[in-house]
Image (cartoon, rainbow, N blue to C red):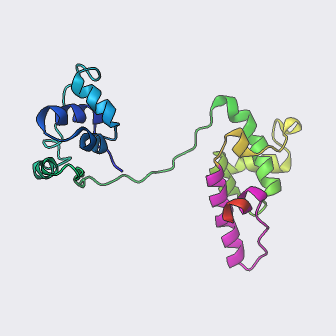
Amino acid sequence: MTLPLMPKATAVWLIEKTALTFTQIADFCGMHPLEIQAIADGEVAQGIVGYDPVANGQVSLDEIHRCEANEALRLKLLPTTLPQPKRLRGARYTPVAKRNDRPDGIVFLLRNYPQLSETQIGKLMGTTKETIQKVRDRTHWNSANIKPRDPVILGLCSQTDLNAMLTQANEKLSREGLAVPPLPVAQADEAA
């Protein structure tokens, strides 16, 4: 459920200006009724200026009056006219402490998931094709110390992202008529 902007300040305004029950205000603001009661008693949110959800287009005055008349009804947010931004995946940032683990994750992916393309590995690991090629050819500057380790365990990518890339790669192989490798044990359990 979508919550109003500044839920505590909105709760303060609704307590001061309306006859809504604590439960109705709590449901609308995503808070517990006891927290709303504490705000009303002055124990919590002292000094918070109320935020008017009517003036800011989050709820209509008619909606408030409708809910004041019947305790069983709940306030509903008005739909926003603002377009929702798409979540864009930019370049992945890898913390400095984990950058030396990246080649280990690349080797793990190359050995265990040969169906993944270099582009897919690059997206998962946040690295370049050049680095992947150097790790594959063992010309990486630290190739003597590279050991295959699971990038999910290392925290370089999520299991969800890895599973999505594997599914995408397997679908591409099946479209091309090539044999699809069996799913790893963790992914086979999720598919069941």
Name, please, the residue furthest toward the right.
Answer: 144
Q: Is residue 68 left or right of residue 141?
A: left
Q: Is residue 116 visible?
A: no
Q: Position of residue 59 (x, y in %)?
A: 18, 48
Q: Is residue 53 left or right of residue 179?
A: left
Q: Quadrant of residue 188?
A: bottom right
Q: Is residue 149 visible?
A: yes
Q: Position of residue 65 (x, y in %)?
A: 11, 49
Q: Is residue 183 above or below residue 145?
A: below
Q: Residue at x 31, y 36 (%)?
A: 33
Q: Position of residue 1 (x, y in %)?
A: 36, 50
Q: Is residue 21 left or right of residue 33?
A: left
* Range of magenta residues: 159-188
Q: Residue at x 62, y 53 (%)?
A: 160
Q: Is residue 188 left or right of residue 47?
A: right
| Residue 161 among magenta residues | yes
Total labels drawn: 0
Quarter of the image that includes the C terminus: bottom right
| Closest to the observer, 35 or 96 | 35
Q: Residue at x 85, y 41 (%)?
A: 147
Q: Is residue 61 above or below residue 165?
A: above
Q: Position of residue 58 (x, y in %)?
A: 21, 46
Q: Residue at x 13, y 39 (%)?
A: 19
Q: Quadrant of residue 21?
A: top left
| Closest to the observer, 80 or 8 | 8
Decide whether the magenta segment is chiefly helix, strand or loop.
helix
| Residue 28 among magenta residues | no
